[in-house]
Image: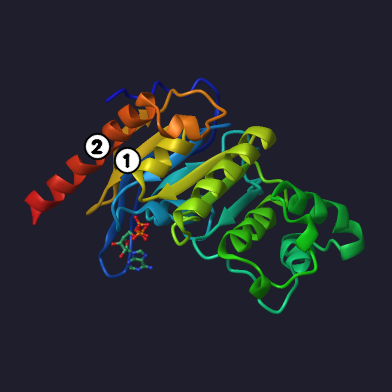
Amino acid sequence: MASRPPAETQPIVSLQGITKSFSNATVALKNLSLDIGAGEFVSLLGPSGCGKSTALRLIAGLSSPTNGRIVWPGEAPGQGDHELGFVFQEPTLMPWATVFANVHLPLRLKGRSVAVARDEVMDALEMVGLAGFADSYPRELSGGMKMRVSIARARVTRPKLLLMDEPFAALDEITRFKLNNDILRLWETLGWTVIFVTHSVFESVYLSSRIVVMAARPGRVVADLAVDAPYPRTEEFRTSHLYSDYCRQASEALHATLNEEERAE
Ligand SMILES: Nc1ncnc2c1ncn2[C@@H]1O[C@H](COP(=O)(O)OP(=O)(O)OP(=O)(O)O)[C@@H](O)[C@H]1O
């Protein structure tokens, strides 16, 4: 497997020797070091329980490492105001509020009224193709549309870094492929950095510029694979030899971790 060369640019975030243990003695992550370069689309790929969500939660500041540190090199020390967006597996929309109000929420929490924020909210909805549904309620939308609202809500604060925790896992395959293309288009247009958690080898290869393969018990990185296939990626890429080559490489790395686990049991 090709190893990814060190990032040439300063990382947007650097995880340095991170260990995370829980009070029940589970070691969710052990000595994890990972630099995420600005503009990368990085997938964290691994079996259930390898600490993918824990890593995202630590980066988001929703939990603290037991050991090690998370550094944001582009920021002045102590600034602590790294703007990031988080998209979860469930769209987590407020059912009683319109699509507009759901997307407005992060700006409202920053004290921006509807009048001030209207253009930004509509812009975010436009980007996900839902400008015509601003006055609809979540119950009136399909699963894919709800997820697009969730992406618009993450986008509305214009974060540099987008964290996505298995966002498309609950969707049917056609919708999932469509959202894969939507998220790539947004990533390419907006210059985002994305960290994307998935169980799917196929999804990780289609989307990523880099795949970090993780193993469980304890959670750790076992392979770091650069996916040197050009963007924009299209359905043609899904059926190419290059795509199947990368799928095979990622799959082998993943299965090596599973075999190791079986031997340990
Ligand atoms: N709050 C917690 N308390 C105790 N153990 C936890 C807690 N959160 C996670 N864990 C454990 O830490 C390990 C890593 O969990 P995590 O959710 O990060 O894995 P994951 O790779 O995202 O799994 P999945 O793909 O199933 O979502 C698991 O063994 C999990 O049971």
Answer left or right for 199 relative to 119: left
Count the numbered circles shown.
Answer: 2
- Residue occupying the point 8% across, 57% down: 265
Percent position (x, y) of residue 251?
26, 39
Say which of 162 and 20 sits in front: 162
Instruction: From the image, tell me which residue sits under label 2.
Output: 253
For the residue with label 2, is its CB less than 8 Å from the closest atom of ligand 1? no
Ligand 1 rendered quadrant: bottom left
Within the image, what quadrant is residue 214 found in? Answer: top left
**At 63% across and 38% down in the image, what residue appears?**
185
- Residue at point 50%, 47% (across, down): 177
**In the image, is residue 79 above or below residue 61?**
above
Q: Amino acid at mark 2?
A: Ala
Q: Alpha-carbon neighbours of circle 2 within 10 Å: few (<14), some, or many (≥20)?
A: many
Res 15 → quadrant:
top left
Horizontal side of 259 relative to 134 (left or right) equals: left
Work out whether 105 lies above or below 168: below
Residue lying farthest bottom?
Answer: 96
- Disc 2 is placed on an element classified as helix
Disc 1 target residue: 213
Task: Give the amino acid at mark 1.
Answer: Val
Q: Are marks 2 and 1 in contact (CB under 8 Å)?
A: yes
| Residue 16 visible in the current orientation | no
Q: Quadrant of the N terminus?
A: top left
Q: Position of residue 123 (x, y in %)?
A: 80, 49
